Amino acid sequence: SETAPPPSERPHLPDMPEKIQHYIGGELVDSADGATFDVLDPVTNEVYIQAAAGKQADVDRAVAAARTAFREGPWPAMLPRERSTVLHRIAEIVTSRDRQLAEMESFDSGLPITQALGQARRAAENFRFFADLVVAQADDTFKVPGRQINYVNRKPIGVAGLITPWNTPFMLESWKLGPALATGNTVVLKPAEFTPLSASLWAGIFEEAGLPEGVFNLVNGLGEEAGDALVKHPDVPLISFTGESATGQLIFANAAPHLKGLSMELGGKSPAVVFADADLDEAINATIFGVFSLNGERCTAGSRILVQREVYDTFVERYAAQARRVRVGYPHEESTEVGALVHPEHVEKVMSYIELGKSEGRLVAGGGRPEGFESGNFVAPTVFADVPPRARIFQEEIFGPVVAITPFETEEEALELANDTKYGLAAYIWTNDLKRAHNFSQGVEAGMVWLNSNNVRDLRTPFGGVKASGLGQEGGYRSIDFYTDQQAVHITL
Ligand code: NAD
């Protein structure tokens, strides 16, 4: 049986709420039927708080509030500059509370505190970015000389349903909230049930920033209940979803009768391809970070490393040695590089892949619980070498600190291996051959490619995947397009 670590190993969180409620029409409320669900602390796996378990009735209330705010409220009709001012205030408040936010996020999700802090700052930046973008928005006008003028009248769509996962919850929520609100929509957010804590801070932040009542609504609850009701609600014309590919397929089907607008950011099994001519030091550092940061619970994790034969043995040896030095620790400690995975169910899944990997590949680092962590959701950074492409640990998303390394001989073989999964989110390529770098990038089936680069983001660029990794792209004006209708107006001259 598991024993909780002594209290000194847990952070003191003075601002912890007593319970987690919904936020509907400007009020914090319980579920209509009073139902709640347990939220676990990933270090002790003890229930630390109860969250309201939303169902159809709660979603109905939230959608009604959002609809009223859209139809009657000032928000959709406000000047972009006015909405932008509110969004900038939100960014300022998030920035001023980034420590508190990161501490709560780290406590709830098990993410290392330093990385949770980075994510809180990204959340502020997401608001700042869309606040700026929406005032710079220019729409098309076309003229047929002597005959007609045509212009685009861009409008917010209505109530946007936002459904988000448990990895980097607050940041991913901001990535949807920013553009949805900037463009004048009203929203109902359904955050992931494993990690509802940081989302409970939005209401206070938005109130303080002056967001009108009813524009932001939050319903907590299980995916099959609250999430499902939101997807099937006839008054919600848009669903922006981030989560597993299988959930995305289900949502796609459930939204079909209403022909909803869908944005789907789904799973990945992204390759990192290391050619013999690459700078090995940089490639090793980046591919270590690429799969072990954020506890490996990262959609764009480089979880398959393909290495050219000439440098394969050296790479594997050095990589395994470095993986063994990655510091597993309590999430709130500054020195921690891999914290606690989000939930015991998820640990079970990751551990089952590790057991499978022992027969599918050659274990060269990790392989189970790290030493000194007898309880909680800790998993040692785990590396398998010589993994054949038909192995399940090569094909399936594990979403934890586990990586599969596979050798290749030629560029053609590398491309074939890189494209040999159902996913197509990201790809990382390491080579000093300029021509090959570009040709390979263009051939690889991935929505995003990083060339001799870590996973860096520029919020103007498209973000999204191909194949089973997603549908549609967000980022920059693409997000504005998703959250608006573009009406064509024609005038005869
Ligand atoms: P998940 O699909 O289990 O859940 C995501 C959200 O959907 C949760 O809020 C959940 O409650 C809700 N949900 C579940 N079933 C639903 C249903 N039937 N109807 C409506 N909503 C439902 O995913 P997860 O385990 O929370 O997150 C991990 C996954 O997310 C991984 O596959 C990861 O790659 C992916 N992800 C993708 C990106 C990206 O940008 N592409 C980013 C982060 C995470």
Image (tube, rainbow, N blue to C red):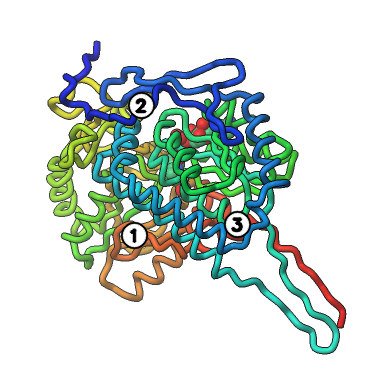
Would residue 281 be visible to someone looking at this image? Answer: yes
| Quadrant that contains the N terminus | top left
Q: Secondary structure at mark 1?
A: loop
**Residue 28 locus on image (x, y percent):** 53, 29
Residue at (73, 45) in percent of width and height: 259
Give the Cα separation between the discs numbered 1 and 2. Answer: 27 Å
Q: Which mark is residue 183?
A: 3
For the point 30% across and 49% down, the residue is: 118
Q: Position of residue 57 (x, y in %)?
A: 66, 24
* 477 displayed left or right of 375: right
Three-letter code for the amino acid on which mark 3 is drawn? Thr
Spot the residue most to the bottom: 146
Mark earlier in primary sequence (1, 2): 2
Q: Are marks 1 and 2 in contact (CB under 8 Å)?
A: no
Residue 219 visible, this orientation? no
- Front in this rendered view, residue 159 or 207: 207
270 or 277, which lies in front? Answer: 270
Q: Report the Cα–Cα distance between label 2 and label 3.
A: 35 Å
Above-or-below relation of 152 to 223 = below
Q: From the viewer's perspective, is residue 317 above or below residue 449? A: above
Report which residue position mark 2 lands on: 343
Write down the quadrant of residue 256 in the picture: top right
- In the rendered image, residue 332, in percent from the top left (x then y), is placed at 22, 35
Give me the disc on residue 456.
Answer: 1
Q: Left of 270 or right of it: where is 7?
A: left
Q: Amino acid at mark 2?
A: His
* Location of the C terminus (image quadrant): bottom right
* Pair 3/1: label in front: 3
Marks 2, 3: nearer the viewer: 3
